[in-house]
Image: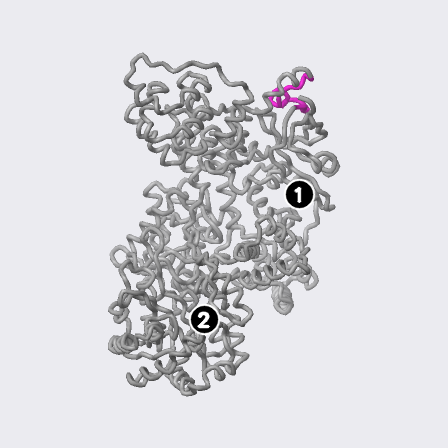
Amino acid sequence: MSTFHIQTEYSLLNSSLKLEELFSKAKENNYDFLTMADNQNLYGMYRFYQLSKKYDIKPIIGLKVYFHYNLSETNLLVYAKNDKGIKNLIKLSTLLQTSTEEITLEKIKDYDEGLFFITPGLNSFFENSLLKQERKNAYTYLEELKSSFKEVYVGLSLQSNELTSIAKEIVEIAEELKTKILITNQSNYLEKEDKVAYDALRQIDNNQNEIDSMDLSFLTKEELIEKYKDYPYVFDNGDALAQKIEYQAPFNQQVLLPKFKTKNNVSSSEYLEALAKVGLKKRLEGTDKNSSIYQERLMHELKVINDMGYADYFLIVYDFVKYAKTNDILVGPGRGSAAGSLVSYCLGITDIDPIFYDLLFERFLNPERKTMPDIDLDFPDNKRDQVIAYVKEKYGKDHIAYIITFGTFALRSSIRDIARVMKIDVSRVNGIIKRVLDDRIDYSDSETVRLLTVAKRIEGLKRHTGTHAAGIILSNDKLTDIIPLQKGMHEMYQTQFEATDLEKLGLLKIDFLGIRNLAIIDEVMKLANLNFKIQDITLDDEKTYELLSSAKTTGIFQLESTGMRQVLRKLKPSNFEDIVSILALYRPGPMDHIDEFIERRHGKTYQQIDTSIQEILDKTYGIIIYQEQIMQIASKFANYTLAEADLLRRGISKKDLSILENERKRFVEKAILNHQNEKTAQTIYDYIVRFANYGFNRSHSVSYAMVAYQMAYLKANYFKTFMTVLLTSVINNPKQTLDYIGEAKQQGIRMMKPNILYSTFEYKETKEGILLPLTMIKGLGNQIVKKIIEKRNQENFKNYDDFKIKTKDIINEKILSVLIFSGALDCFNLSKRTLYENRNLDVVLYGQYLTDYKPKIYDEYDLGTLIEQEFNAYGFNLFYSPLILFGSFKEKENIKDIEEQMHKDSITFVGNVVHIKKIKTKKNQEMAFIKTSDGKLEVELTVFPNEYERYIKTMKPTYYIIQARKDKNTYILTSMKEILGV
């Protein structure tokens, strides 16, 4: 027995009933079956079905359908009786989520087969008619339901006095129309005390303070029996119906890989082999690489791919990568373990030679572990949608879909949302959150305790839906026949199941990642008119390694953080392998080995574990950095196949003691059979285990290093173009904008104020420097800028008044003011004060007819006003720094600008601190990296613990005389003295 009206957490903001908790309580109470009917969706259907098997409770899957009837909206509970019903339920849910037309009974009738329908027992046309004493309407409605659907039941709910008062009439009408009655005691939360959390969810959703007094908790069997004791036959009806419900195989769990249409109808495996062989020939042309090694590897990979049935998969990916490259869309060199496949390299899917870089195919596709291959693809973020549109066009709208994600209540957001419902002041909430994070909760404060109790209850609940950042689903069968869908972006479907569930169902997920860094590479190549492909650049460019060694890597993929730049200064990369290694090491865990790695890289001697594996570890100076090294050691030392070695790697990385001991035994036995010493085998196994958790996917590291190197190459060799494109990419990020402008200025690039006659939406490279865009001025959105440019393109602005006349319908005086103080109107050769005092736009209404009209001329504002107004125009100062005001002080104290001292071993300048990055040393002492500015240039200083304690901990937001000493390519803070009385 059970109720036929349970709504779970997937009825977003309308239930706090978590699936696992629901099944756990149902099992404790010996429930025979459980139902699920969320609002209009099947988001939780697959998880509900999986949990039913785990808890051995029969699932009855359904949803609540909202539709129009008799000029109002009402609803029905709809459940599947069998596999055909599941299919129709999926189609019905897709209709509800995607239809632009009104849903009516007529539309629902099309999906009747295999389904049964129940009046909900509350808040539907049937019960509401009876509550309004409109018995005839209720009777007619039930008649119409029975004539529309093969199997209809009447729901009975006694969850309020009003519903109890009409129960007798419900029974009478049901008996008159020979319709069986089922319990529909609605459940939206687990226990009675969860009502407060449920009420909060409803208020968050509706922003209303009305609270329903009805109990919607999930009742125990005993509570249900007691509540419905006057209608004992409803339990028999429910049990009898549940007996008839049977799902044999509701979810098709075989691989639903699309079939690739080949030329001349040759088999997929033959076509793949032919393409790969042609690709290999092209890849080897003009090289001295050993072709027999490549051909042997290629045939091995093709056999594995074909034996596992994945030829179509590779051809599908090959096809849309080919489309991208044919249509001038840059494709990333590789991502993840797919870069370890020679077939991928030969097809042009990747641009990483796996043999040259010592990458392993079995790390990507293991014949001893039946899983779908996973090729993730990178495209410029501004062209990703174009590739997806091609895939949609090729395979059809019904075969492709975006993937749903769910945003959940995190602890902080839970506290804030519940506090808003409880009307707790924001400043008090901030204090409560800080105490929670610091583990200093005041349990004597009843309001805080109540707030946190409710917040904890909703923490982790689904709050809203979103779209997976990269993934799409592709299917041979129509997705509308397999899974529930809803509206997605760009007139495409979106799945109602999450990615993990989709992959369990055998659906093909491909990640199309939109990468800003590829868009930067692409745009720099075009703006600089470079007539070579980025993948063809040499990996030994001197300028590039100079840039990397000096850590001038702001804007460079993976190499931009303060910590990474510190590592680069120490390492001083001089070859590509250095970049690959440091990307693999710069992560929590392996970070602890960075200093040792750098010391060994620069000549420190170290003890080899064993000469038999020396060749494998030489490249990384005796430290296991990559997962592939574990596989290679197992293969060489203990004669594992690479497929077996991959399973070993996966097993020991789980850190399960029983697995570790079993694998140890096997490793040692295989090593002895391979004529190795047992003691050495034990030592090597221990060494593998030590690094197993830290090892990084080398294929991924090489791929990332390639993108990083390509960006560094462009920055080192085409600096101005690179910075122009980089600045455009962060146009909405003030902090990064200031950082990048500071670096450009430091390298001697002139930053030019926006110019109303030439500036656009983006930064522009000119002979003189880099011209700023109009869009970085506060208050100038894209639409306003677009209209100004359209006017300008018709005929450029001749002077200030001509500008005002032509844009009078686009801008107001407030926008005109920020244009003035940004410097965008300096091109009219009038002082900012003259421009501002003549800003009245009404003048243009008559001024345009007066040929002798002249604006009144004023002297320029004082420096303080210009500094203040420029800040208002941008949100920061670009051309007028407050530090200019210290000119006479600097002259008196004989303090020079940073730029004039760059050749010295120490520098002294007047400046302020614009950014602090705090870290802790290995001894747990505080230190920092600070960015300072003298108003013209920025310089980064390292602040060691003593100076941190003395200067930074008590620092004020003011100006200082700052002294620093040079240490190779960095500066170390030595002193800071606050400037007073200036």
On whether residue 385 falls in the magenta region, the answer is no
Looking at the image, residue 657 sits to the left or right of residue 89; the answer is right
**Mark 1 residue type:** Ile
Using a 10 Å C-alpha cutoff, classify the residue at mark 1 as few (fewer than 14 neighbours), some (14 to 19) or many (20 or more): some
Q: Position of residue 552 (x, y in %)?
A: 56, 33
**Mark 2 residue type:** Phe
| Residue 109 falls in image quadrant | bottom left
Which of the two marks, 1 or 2, is nearer to us in this view? Answer: 2
| Observer able to see residue 186 | yes
SS category of the residue bearing label 2? helix
Q: Quadrant of the N terminus?
A: bottom left
Up/down of 51 relative to 210, above or below: below
Of the two numbered discs 1 and 2 on the same chain, state the one appearing first in sequence. Answer: 2
| Observer able to see residue 616 | no
Q: Give the color scheme: rainbow, by chain, secondary structure or one colour.
A: one colour
- Residue that badge 1 annotates: 919
Up/down of 626 relative to 94, above or below: above
Give how far apart the Cα atoms at labels 1 and 2 are: 45 Å
Q: What residue is at 53 percent from the left and 80 percent from the top?
A: 29
SS category of the residue bearing label 1? strand
- The foreground one among 600 and 690 is 690
Q: Position of residue 96 (x, y in %)?
A: 32, 63
Q: Which residues are magenta?
A: 893-909
Q: Quadrant of the C terminus?
A: top right
